[in-house]
Amino acid sequence: MKHLPINIKLHQQPVWVLGGGTVALRKIQPLLSAGAEVYCVARRFHPDIRTLTIDHSIWLTKHDLKDLSVLEQLPRPRLVVSATDDPLINRQVYHFAKTHDLLINTVDDQPLCDYITPAIVDRSPVVVAISTEGASPVLARMIKQKISYLLPANLGSLARKARQMRQSIKENIPDFNNRRRFWQRFFDWSHASLSLFKDPHMNPGKEHIDELISEVNQTAGRVSLVGAGPGDPDLLTIKAIKVLQSADVVLHDHLISSDIMAMIRKDAELIDVGKQAGKHLTKQQVINQLLVEHARQGLHVCRLKGGDPFVFGRGGEEIQQLNKHQIPFEIVPGITAAVGCAAYAGIPLTHRDHAQGLAFITAHCSDSKDRIDWQFYAKNQQTLAVYMGLIKAEHLVTQLILHGKNPSVPVAIIENGTRHNQRTVTGQLHQLAAMIDEHKINSPALIIIGEVAGYAEQLDWFSPHVAYQPEEAYLKSA
Ligand code: SAH
């Protein structure tokens, strides 16, 4: 680290900005936000700079900076910003600043800088500053964007209220640990719904503080049922990331990718409640029980599931349990496997020419409970996305063909969809079981049946391992 970030107090302090163009304008705005008195010297001024003089503390001096004597007449500044488009003038200004012992920033010329300004996310009084020490302003802006997505819009008002109440809360909750717990709950975003915030202008009085403390302490835990998508961490929603970074406990499926697990708050408790087909490591009742128990301790519980929680995810059963025990919950949808796999394999799930409908089905249901309407799914002009279809593929193919599906309709199998090891195999419906066998397809894999599946052969833009076998290969083994 070559620069120490400090927050400098500029309220009613003079700052010189030399230059009057768009760059100067960009530098003036945050200075005015910080309450500085800006003295701007230039030959010409951007119209927006002129406009700022109407109701801000900014004074303009029209002067050619080839002659710096004018600066002697201005009040001595805390900071100097040199933002002219003339490198020679910038260098002269720099030397002037050095001889007068002034801290100077020369825009886009680091050797002529005593200080540099970071990119800022401003949720005053919360201010996040991002610096790459000048290595890449574009990178700093990208990081700024990511951080601003993550910070709730009401963070500023939350922090202002906290400042107003800090002393009263200290008096009312003398125990340090209890106080910390109170503040953690207070800042938990869901508490933006607390009565205190119904009227944003209200100054919290004694009675409000008492009410707030009991409200915050009473607030039970809650559960966020979060869809983690099919694997690529970039397919997480912003809301999912927010929950991962705030939850106290995460009950996760077995196969959530390590990149996604890495986004969980570092001190959160992790509980692997994964289930694999055929061998239930943890029974659903145990999961339901764990959700209820943890939420009852007042914790924010995240139930993290692959894909979308409501698509073959038993999310419905989990929230029924929570509802029964009056535990508040929210659902954060995720990209389901069919949508993610199809997109990453170049398969349009619907297509004007080939498929006007789409069905998500599972082949994984015990024979005795087989309630699949085969006749319906055997119809043309629709796409079938089959979840958990590997083991029952043969049964699936037999039933569809028996009910009238064309045996040569295209199929695609997408293994590890959206992950770095995604593999796509295409063929025809009657070859499906042989394809799974021959390519040793492993779970998780999604099967797409319908004319659109053939598009993968031309449009797969992502799979590093693609197996488009000539038809004969399967005919031999089928
Ligand atoms: N709730 C999940 C589905 C759970 S069922 C969702 O919405 O996606 C598990 C099945 O989903 C797997 O057997 C497989 O068929 C499919 N699946 C999940 N992730 C997958 C992936 N990355 N690639 C291919 N199929 C996947």
Image (spheres, helix red, strand yellow):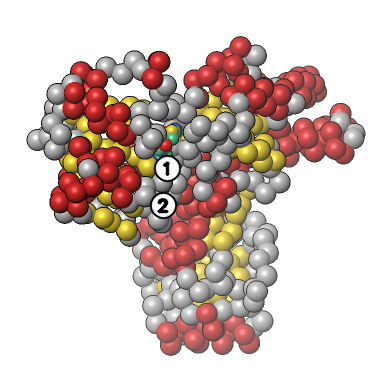
For residue 151, which quarter of the picture?
A: top right
Q: Position of residue 413 (x, y in %)?
A: 30, 44
Q: Secondary structure at mark 2?
A: loop
Q: Residue furthest front?
A: 476
Query: Is 404 on the left or on the right of 371, as rendered?
Result: left
Q: Which residue is disc 2 drawn over?
A: 419
Identity of the residue drawn at 37% across and 47% down: 441
10 Å neighbourhood of mark 2: few (<14), some, or many (≥20)?
some
Identity of the residue drawn at 67% across and 61% down: 7
Q: Position of residue 316 (x, y in %)?
A: 49, 20
- Separation of marks 1 and 2 at Cα, in angstroms: 11 Å
Q: Residue furthest left?
A: 353
Query: Is 450 on the left or on the right of 222, as rendered?
Result: left
Three-letter residue code for mark 2:
Arg
Q: Residue furthest top?
A: 324
Residue 398 vs residue 220, the one in the foreground:
398
10 Å neighbourhood of mark 1: few (<14), some, or many (≥20)?
some
Q: Secondary structure at mark 1?
A: loop
Q: Is mark 1 within 8 Å of ligand 1?
A: yes
Residue 370 vs residue 205, the one in the foreground:
370
From the image, which quarter does the N terminus lie in?
Answer: bottom right
Quadrant location of ligand 1? top left
